[in-house]
Image (cartoon, rainbow, N blue to C red):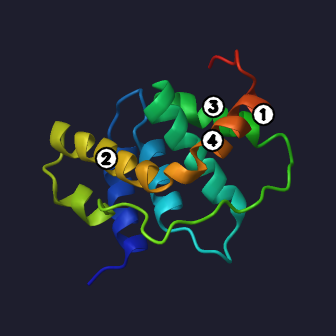
């Protein structure tokens, strides 16, 4: 049975070859990072993943816009702190995404996956929104 990481690589082949300028690959990367975070891992990966989910699901950013936000955040050289990790990080897994038919069905499943993971982190929503406000500014537009 393939690991979550191996399945995420398989999904990456799909998302990177997608050709959509919205760049859904970024959403899959962010969902995977937040869902598979470890307490001993690097906080930046989890924080950036959660910021990406927040920007996508609550602010309507495309994957390309989220990628640009990550690039801007990456210039701050902050020491990020690990957010509180929920025990359960969503009911939708990368295997569920891959089980969907490639095309619109799979693309929609990526959004369901993102929403499932973001909902699991609802207790840190305010913290993530504040990081976005502080680091990107309330009027920041991609």
- What is the secondary structure assignment of the residue under circle 4? helix
What residue is pinned by disc 4?
A: 126
Instruction: Determine the secondary structure under disc 2.
Output: helix
Q: What kind of element bears circle 3?
A: helix
| Residue under the point 32% across and 42% down | 111
Image position of 64 (left or right of 116): right
What numbered label is drawn on residue 68? Answer: 3
Are discs 1 and 3 less than 8 Å apart at CB?
A: no
Residue count near mark 1 (Cα–Cα under 10 Å), binned few <14, some 14–19, many ≥20: some
Residues at badges 4 and 1 in contact (C-beta under 8 Å)?
A: no
Q: Residue at x 75, y 23 (%)?
A: 137
Tell me, yes or no, whether the two marked residues, 4 and 3, touch with CB atoms within 8 Å. Answer: no
Q: Is residue 63 something that shows in the picture?
A: no
Q: CA distance from mark 1 to mark 3?
A: 13 Å
Q: Which residue is mark 1?
A: 135
Quadrant (top left, top right, bottom left, bottom right) of the C terminus: top right
- CA separation, marks 4 and 1? 14 Å
Of tags 4 and 1, which is closer to the observer?
4
Q: Considering only order in the chain, which callout, 1 or 2, is on the residue closer to the N terminus? A: 2
Q: Distance between the Cα atoms at labels 2 and 1?
A: 27 Å
**x and y percentages locating residue 92 in the rendered image:** 29, 59
Neighbourhood count class around disc 4 (C-alpha, 10 Å): few under 14, some 14–19, many 20 upward: few
Residue 4 visible (yes or no): yes
**Cα distance in 3D space between marks 2 and 4:** 24 Å
Q: CA distance from mark 3 to mark 2?
A: 20 Å
Point out residue 78 in the picture as x, y percentages from the top left corner. 86, 49
Q: Is residue 74 left or right of residue 115?
A: right
Q: Which numbered tag is attached to residue 110?
A: 2
The single residue placed furthest to the left in the displayed view is: 101
């Amino acid at each position: 049975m393939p690991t979550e990481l191996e399945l995420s690589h398989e999904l990456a082949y799909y998302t990177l070859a997608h050709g959509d300028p919205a760049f859904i690959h970024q959403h899959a990367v962010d969902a995977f990072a937040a869902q598979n975070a470890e307490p001993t891992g690097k906080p930046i990966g989890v924080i950036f993943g959660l910021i990406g989910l927040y920007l996508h699901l609550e602010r309507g950013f495309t994957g390309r816009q989220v990628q640009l936000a990550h690039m801007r955040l990456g210039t701050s050289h902050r020491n990020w702190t690990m957010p509180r990790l929920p025990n359960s990080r969503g009911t939708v897994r990368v295997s569920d995404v891959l089980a969907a038919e490639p095309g619109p069905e799979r693309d929609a499943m990526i959004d369901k996956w993102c929403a499932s993971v973001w909902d699991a982190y609802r207790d840190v929503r305010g913290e993530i929104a504040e990081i976005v406000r502080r680091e990107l500014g309330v009027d920041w537009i991609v």
